[in-house]
Amino acid sequence: MSEQFRRKTPGEILESISNIKRGRLKIILGAVSGSGKTYHMLLEGNELKERGIDVVVGVVNKSCSGTLKQLGSLELIPTIEWEQNGHIEQDIDLEKIYKRNPEVVLIDRLAHKNHIHAKNATRLDDVKELINNEISVITTLNIYELKGVKKVAEQLLNVSLHVEVTLPEDTLTKADEVRLLDVTPEAILKRLQKGEISEQDECPLQFYNNGNLATLRELSLRFLAEEVEVDLTEHREQEGLMGPSGATERILVCVQYHWNGSILIRRGDQIAKRLGGEFLIASFIPLAKKLSKEEEIFKSSMQKLVNKLNGRFFEIIMNGDEIAEGIVVFSMQHRITRIILGHSKKSVWEEAVNGSIVNKIMRKSKSIDVYIMADLVKAFGERTIPAIKKDKKKGNPYRRLSNDEMRDKVERVKKGTFKIFIGAAPGVGKTYTMLREANQLKENEMDVVIGLLEAHGRKETIAQVGNLEILPKKRIRYKNVLLEEMDLDAIISRNPEVVLIDELAHTNVPGNKNHKRYQDVMDILDAGISVISTMNIQHIESLKDSVKQITGVSVRETVPDSILQLSDELELIDISPNALRKRMEEGNIYAMDKVEQSLSHFFKTQNLIALRELVLRELADDVDDRLESKKRKEGVRGPWRKDEVIFVCVNLRADSERLIRRGFRIAYRLKAEWYVIFVKHPNERQTDEKLILDKLISLTHRLGGTFELYTTRDRRSVFKEIKKQLQTKKATQIILGQSARTRWQEIVGGSIVARLLREVRHLDVLIVAD
């Protein structure tokens, strides 16, 4: 049902009426002091003022001169000043604000304790009072100033944060809009070197190092992702939608009260951590079954383990012959993306007559992956998270570099630096921010030019160009039409220090040197020129299936994940879905004739919430990987183990590209070798076979895998060849698509999926949802 025509519930009607009589609260959230929250709050205030909205400043942190420049012509309401421990503290003057009665008031540092004789105990109470009196507030907050998050941050950083006052964890939930101001550790450290960050009580200057900043950045991304998922769940429930949203992973481990239950739980925890997903454990007990003393003991130990791992445990009593259906129903209700089970203990005959839980689940659910864990857990139980080893070479700071290491170091020095602004959708402000950063670089006397700009007629974006030099495009004739493209040779010939290149995922017109714009960027970086570029989350190759599940749109233009991994900085431009839709309605993203269609399709609120969650989680994973990689390079942790080997088995079916992308994402998270195998037999005839194969091989190579093609005499030999290659390559995990055959066809003609499950019990098997 279209959300614009959906009938509101009585509760929603009452809420809408009460919201009309109150102001709005917007929070600009940062990972740490110095991330630019105050600067952006004032910037937004000036933009609102230019649009004719009455804005005043209630209180602002005056410690940074660069921030105060941004005050511009904004009216500053005098504050109530008082002294504490030699510091001058500021409380907002509510009486003066009420007398002035503006539409919006800017209030810095939401986590503040007022003077003991003040009307309200905290600044948060002041803000709530203003909102109830129909005055909107834009304010700033650091992630560790939330009560529960502070404790987590201190545990992760192993330090004590001297935060004067913390706010309730639901502060973000109660805000009308939360915008995360994502800043890379590199950018914050540059600000520190320039003296743009002052000493903070909670974070002294010695606190500012790459590890601490990256940890807080990841924490803020993941915390906001969880908040966004709550919104997404509520929205999907209102629309009557069940099952996985496509924005996040949610793992369900199905256990019996048996000795291997704890092993399954530990494996599920490892997988959930690697995939950044939630972790649930459930035991489905037949109605007539009474637990033995041994099973009661196993149950108790499992529950203790689940509590230790911060999972959620469920026990479901049901009819014994409906357990498979119960697992599927439970999974749909809890939006599970992957079910983890142990291998079936039944014989071939028992499975043929009665079926197995695994096969029944796969037949009843086509939207949930099924992961069957290897039997030989003693051999492979710790493989999911690579082991830590010491590298003796890295422990010696005086070791002479090898010729290869020296060449690699020289090449890295010669290359330009690469920064990408990434967003959840078009219109979030990536190009605008890129241009603003370029103007700041130019003010610092750097040679910056625009190599390619896609402003889409947006006035605010065009205004940011200022006096930046724009290099002319080149014209290419294609099918009797003159088309414009970025001039790669002109950029390299001009040889600036920094070049701006919009829309990284663009496909070039035939006739260019490179097929894709990201390949042009690689050439420019190799020439020693730094690049700042932009892209959206839907253009990441391995997320193509998630984006299609969320939006129903199959994205044609993509960028290999490796390009993002090669970037020196990856920065999120965040905006709330409601704010983005408002920009769309006002014609600030697309032309007015396209607005209505966009709002009812790609830009539906549900889609934008899910894409926002997806980009938050993806960037958090990227931060985690970069931090992990840095620790290993510095010898804090040893190198990755190379003995995790993943096999993706494909055929000429339409879902094979999806299997390859899934294989890559799993292999990348596990830092594993991975192969894609296709075994061809004479009976498999398809007119476009070569075209399909070329696409599969190209995708595998783009994502960094190895494609293996084998030919057999007949269909029955396919399994033998797959098994042979699994043994030769010492595979530890297989990824398969669900069988397209009916149960009767599997009984009569057999199934490669079913046979693999029976004969490779020593391997983990992931069966990807259809």
Image (spheres, rainbow, N blue to C red):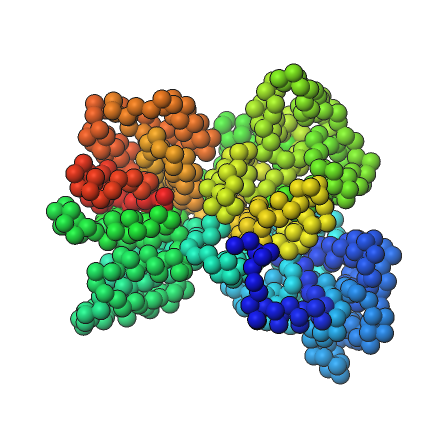
> Which residue is found at the position 52% from the left and 64% from the top?
152
Residue closer to the observer: 382 or 274: 274
Camera-nearest residue between 281 and 25? 25
Q: Quadrant of the C terminus?
A: top left
651 sits left or right of 695 in the view: left
**Residue 569, image x, y percentages:** 61, 42
Residue 603 placement, left or right of 711: right
Which residue is depicted at the point 77% across and 39% down?
Answer: 462
Q: Is residue 292 left or right of residue 659?
A: left
Residue under the image location 43 percent in, 27 percent down: 695
Q: Position of residue 207 (x, y in %)?
A: 62, 58
Image height of 150 relative to 690, above or below: below
Task: Tell me: residue 650, above or below residue 120.
Answer: above
Q: Is residue 334 visible?
A: yes
Q: Residue 500: where, in percent of width, then height?
A: 70, 34
Identify which residue, 655 or 100, lies in the foreground.
655
Q: Is residue 571 visible?
A: no
Q: Residue furthest bottom?
A: 117
Query: Residue shown at 58%/22% (left/top)?
Result: 514
Image spot of residue 355 (x, y percent) = 19, 50
